[in-house]
Amino acid sequence: MTSVDLAGRVALVTGATSGIGAATAALLAERGAHVLVAGRDAARGAHVVAAIRTRGGKADFVAADLRTADSVRQLAREATGLGGGHVDILVNNAGIYPLGPTERASRSDVDTVYDVNVKAPFYLVAELAPEMAERGRGAIVNVSTQAAQKGMAGAALYGSSKAALDQLTRSWVAEYGPRGVRVNTVSPGPTRTQGTAAMGDDLDALAAEAPAGRPAEPEEIAEAIAYLAGDSASFVQGALLAVDGGRTAI
């Protein structure tokens, strides 16, 4: 372990069994946090937890289906129990990102995207932020997307759900910020993960539109999330940190 600035903190990371979530879980653990790895795939979760423990970190897997309010609230309760009665850091990373023409989106598609991308973070914050506020300390990091800031053909459903999450960040700053809970957003650009592998050359083409000219690695996004979760960002509230290679700047 090379850094322990998050020692004693409990961090719940959703969608943490692969990609950006797994990289974030690993980095928060390296910095001393007890990380709760939330996801639906127990085998992948066990792999992430084992890797963290092998490096000397502390982690546990928590099964999570974010498509229903009851299961989200159950996740919050289990995380609080595993955390010894509290969660100090919440990373709302889990998300689904179907792309395609608006007219082809089914009612089920719309419901599922908003259940996972908007309602799940909402219910998790409703369960966990009040206790953070009572203790006068906490950090919430919402993971958004460049598609929430720029109009992109085929991304109406995904982009609008994340734009809603961006607004939730601002609302939660007003609601919980005065009581010591910091809420911020990280907005990634195209990133190489298991989930985006199916995009093939389209991922590189999308990334080529940005000044950086390449997709991000999950660890690059995780660094931004960990910064906002830690004390180095103690005066950062309501920020939207674009980690998109400069795409939204041009």
Image: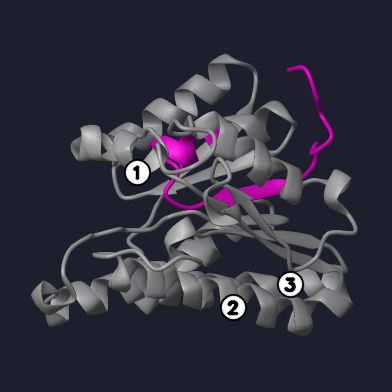
Q: What residue did someone put label 1 on?
A: 206
Instruction: Give residue 241's quadrant in the image.
Output: bottom right
Q: Quadrant of the N terminus?
A: top right
Q: Is residue 59 visible?
A: no
Query: Which is more N-terminal, label 1 or label 3?
Result: 3
Which mark is first along the chain, 1 or 2? 2
Could you give the CA–CA distance between mark 3 and mark 1, rounded to whole angstroms? 41 Å
What range is drawn magenta here? 1-23
Mark closer to the observer (3, 1)? 1
Tag 2 or tag 3, which sits nearer the N-term?
A: 3
Is 107 drawn above or below residue 235 in the view shown?
Answer: below
Q: Residue at x 42, y 77 (%)?
A: 119
What residue is shown with label 2?
A: 168
- SS under mark 2: helix
- CB-based contact (under 8 Å), mark 3 and mark 2: no
Mark 2 vs mark 1: in front: 1
